[in-house]
Image (cartoon, rainbow, N blue to C red):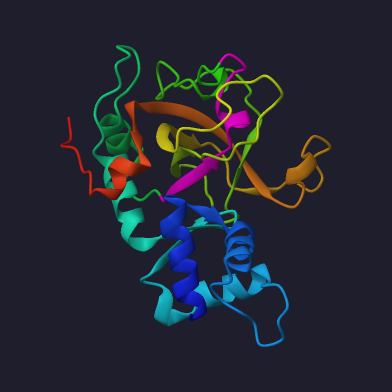
Amino acid sequence: MELHKAIEAVLRDAGGPLHVRDIAAAIDRSGLYQRGDGGPLPTAQVHARIGKRRYRDSFVQLGDGVIELATRHAGLAAAMTSAPESTGATVSTVSQIDALYGPGAAKWVWTAKPAYAFEVDGRDREILEPVADPLHGDEEDRGWWTCDPQTRAGDLAVVYRSATPINEPGCLPRRGPKDLRQVILALSDAFALASDPLAGEFADKHGCRYMPVSALAPSVSIALVRTGFAPSRR
């Protein structure tokens, strides 16, 4: 099987975005593609294949090395820009946020493992709760969130809560719901995290200051997005 076909097969099977290192590992495990030298598939080769002009209509690079099928990404964009209203009376709807910040803003999908998306009791993380008045912001310092190096202040992102079964001991849920939930406003341009002593495993990434400005309520499952879901704007 050709490499681009193997990448497509892995992404279809995953049902959502994957990091290039996870794509390479899945291809090696499945044997869908074999290198001429018989060695393991480097992530750089996956990056190079996806970046070729002929395949740019097949894949979308969501930032931070995360890749999605272009056909499915179209559904993600539709869900983000025309999602149902939030149930919170003081929280702006996604449509309102898109009207305020959307024109001219780049839109991203940020992937969050369960450990970063939920509190220990399974509730949404407090730092991802939308602010009541996005126009005036709030004074809470949430730190940074990892992002693509091309992220700029004013960009919008929707948080995809992945199914990666990695969490703190005893935390719930053990697996993420594979859905789209919070809408985030980037408050700064992306900056390198290498000099941040708290960056830890993200020291080789970029991050930006951020503010949660809305939420999809109910959240939008990847399974629903794959059906071509595109709710009407409210």
* Quadrant holding the C terminus: top left
Taking depth in this image into account, of 124 and 22 the one nearest to the observer is 22
Image mark count: 0
205 with respect to 149 (left or right): right
Say above or below: 44 vs 221: below
- Residue 118 highlighted magenta (yes or no): yes
User: Outermost residue toward the front?
Assistant: 30
- Position above or below: 135 against 20: above
Q: In this view, does 55 lie above or below 74?
A: below
Task: Give the image location of residue 78, x and y in percent.
Answer: 26, 46
Say which residue appears at 44% left-offset and 74% top-offset.
5
Q: Where is residue 151 in the image (x, y as percent from the top left)?
A: 53, 50
Q: Which residue is drawn at 44% across and 80% down?
A: 53
The answer to whether residue 23 is left or right of residue 1 is right
Residue at the (64%, 44%) spot, across then down: 207
Magenta includes 37?
no
Q: Which of 83 and 89 is in front in this view?
A: 83
Q: Position of residue 105 (x, y in %)?
A: 39, 48
Q: Quadrant of residue 179?
A: top left
Give the residues drawn in magenta, as a range.
106-121
